[in-house]
Amino acid sequence: IDFRKHVLNDFAFTRNRIWGFGDYVKHILFNQRKTIQNNIDTHLNYVKNGVDSYRKQSFSEQRININPNVFKRISINYLRNIGYINFQKNSEFFRTFYGFRLFAGDGSRFELPNKKLTLEEFGFPENYNRVPQVIFSGVVDVLNDFIIDGLIGRRGVGEHTLIHKNIENCRRLIIPEESIFIFDRGYNSIELMVRIIEMHSFFVIRLKKDTYTCEREGMTSDDEIVQIGLDKIRRKKFKSNHFKNKMRVVNALNLRIVNIELETGEIESLITNLPQETMSKEQLKEIYNARWGIECTYKTLKQRLQIQNYTAQTEIGIQQDIYATFLLYNIYCYSRIYLNLIINKNMRKKGKKDYYEVNQSNLISRLKIDLFETI
């Protein structure tokens, strides 16, 4: 990486100091969600350039010059290094669903420090008297659990705005023709469908009961191709001028709607651009059920990795903390896949047929302790 591309101030990191850009980045990557001084002391145990002390004020002054996106870039480089990006389909490590990777997109509310500087930078009014929260939007491979992209918004920025940016960021990291994006009913957006169709990829979205009711009334079976009309009202909701102009000559989208009866007797409707000959009704149900994996990811990020325990009050610093956590989480996911493979191979040799999994809490605890030394 050319580190100058990730420096926000042209004059930062130009002098030859004992601690350079890489040292600051490593410090943020490996922070253990303790105080800044404790993190500095832990970091100093592993540096090899003779530094035995460093002031937290100096660290805070330098970190604002680091573009938070460098941490997302490092996490993606890690996925590339382990063979996940540009993968081989016969890999024993990475799971697919009939040759497709399943990517769930969803948002989650992240709490922010109730500090004057934080509120100001994230767009909250002065003297805000409630717990400040903003939307974090992510895309996760729900079969392998890796975070492919994540974005933290400012106040007033919604899930739909962020998910479009997520999809665009993912575009160069995936094989679109072999990818299926899964969304809950909060993402019934024709514009989102159009974006995914344009990139030659696929989607499975759960419909709200009151969505496309006119079109669904004409269905004579539980699995049909339905014309979703594109009138002026629906086009007007498009935020992208590119897609709005492109859809002016398109009167309708031919999409597949599938009705699935749940164990409770309730009917769940899914909309997709996957052909019937590619995925059956039962397979679509499996695909949508896999969406739950992103909820598990958010739970792990918040409870195990303490992603909301920030070491900064500035917007840049909070973004750095969040995006740096992607690396630890993805290392955890790969380690779990690898260890589960080894454990179960050894168990098979012993004649045991049950499936065994490494303990999540223990593995994350060990990674937090050993990550500096491992890297």
Image (cartoon, rainbow, N blue to C red):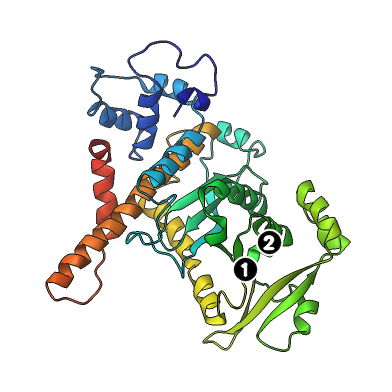
The single residue placed furthest to the left in the displayed view is 350
Query: Residue 346, image x and y in percent?
Result: 16, 66
- Residue 315 shows up from this direction: yes
Query: Would you identify the image quadrant in which residue 361 lies?
Result: bottom left
Instruction: Reply above or below: 77 against 93.
Output: above
In what element is the residue under mark 1? Answer: strand
Which badge, 2 or 1, comes first in the chain's sequence? Answer: 2
Q: Residue at x 65, y 86 (%)?
A: 222
Identify which amino acid the numbered label 1 is placed on: Ile
Above or below residue 231? Residue 150 is above
Which label number is shown at residue 235? none
Q: Residue at (65%, 69%) from the top-left corner?
A: 273
User: In which quadrant is the N terminus drawn?
Assistant: top left
> Which numbered disc covers residue 193?
2
- Rendered-image quadrant of the C terminus: top left
Please tell me which residue lies in front, 106 or 76. Answer: 76
Looking at this view, is 357 or 83 the one in front? Answer: 83
Residue 108, position as x, y percentages in the image: 54, 55
| Residue 32 located left or right of residue 287 | left
Snapshot quadrant of residue 255: bottom right
Residue 309 seen anywhere in this rendered image of the structure = no
Q: Dot 1: few (<14), some (14–19), or many (≥20) neighbours within 10 Å?
A: many
Label 1 belongs to which residue?
205
Horizontal arrangement in the rendering, residue 157 relative to residue 322 (left or right): right
Q: Secondary structure at mark 2?
A: helix
Image point (52%, 13%), residue name: 11
Marks 2/1 in contact by CB < 8 Å: the verdict is: yes
